[in-house]
Structure formats: structure tokens, C-alpha cells
Amino acid sequence: MAPVTTLRGSASTQSGSADVDDATAQRLVSDLVDRDVVTLVPAGRVLVHEPSGTTFDSTTQLAVFHRGWTTGRDADTEGE
């Protein structure tokens, strides 16, 4: 498993989330939880993106991150 990195709200991370509204983020994160890509950690009130080991305290940040992570992973796969 990758080292855990925690991302919290900041101007730099929130500016990239403008294209993901709360409802879209909730649906995406719910789907990722169902597929075991994201783990909810109730005690810490965080979401863990399992493939990267990155934790989030915001569904919107996680949704934006996952979209970028998936795009990067797909680009790496196409380049091989």
C-alpha cells in the first residue's frame, strides 16, 4: 500500500473542484465505496482512496482527485 497522504480543503484544491457539484461527488464516492476503491474511516471522519493511499475529508475533493488519478492511470496504460 502507498504511504498515506491527507488532503484537506484549501484554495488550491477547491479551485479544481468547480466542475464537480456536491450531488455528483456523493454519487461517485458512493460508487467507489461500493467497488472497494474508497474506504470510509468513521473514527477519523475521512475517506481513503485505496489505490493511492490518499485520504480526504471531503467527497468533492476525493471525486476530483479520483477523476485525475483515473485519467493519469489511463494515459500511462495507453503509453505502454
Image: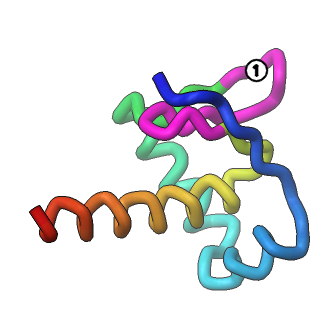
- Estimate the x, y position of residue 58 in percent, counting from the top left: 76, 51
Image location (x, y in percent) of residue 55:
68, 38
Q: Is residue 9 above or below residue 42?
A: below
Q: Is 41 rendered above or below residue 5?
A: above
Q: Which residue does the image show at 13% across and 68% down from the upper left? A: 78
Looking at the rendering, which quadrant does residue 75 occupy?
Answer: bottom left
In the picture, residue 46 is in which quadrant? top right
Q: Locate residue 16, reporting x and y percent.
A: 68, 78
- Tell whether 63 sits left or right of 12: left
Residue at 54% over, 38% down: 49
SS under mark 1 = loop
**Residue 23 vs residue 66: left or right?**
right
Q: In this view, does 74 lie to the left or right of 65?
A: left
Amino acid type of the residue tagged 1 in the rendering: Pro
Seen at 82% across and 16% down, the residue is 43
**Nearer to us in this view, 23 or 80:** 80
Q: In this view, does 18 lie above or below 31?
A: below
User: Which residue is at the front of the view, 7 or 40?
Assistant: 7
**Which residue is labeled 1 in the image?**
42
75 to 33, vertically: above or below: below
Magenta stretch bounds: 41-54
Magenta stretch encompasses residue 1: no
Residue at 83% over, 23% down? 44
| Quadrant the C terminus occupies | bottom left
Judging from the image, the colouring scheme is rainbow
**Looking at this rendering, what residue extends furthest in the front direction?**
80
**The quarter of the displayed image where residue 21 is located:** bottom right
Residue at the far right in the pictured view: 10
Residue 60 x, y percent position in the rendering: 68, 61
State left or right for residue 56 relative to residue 2: right
Q: Nearer the viewer, residue 68 or 45?
A: 68
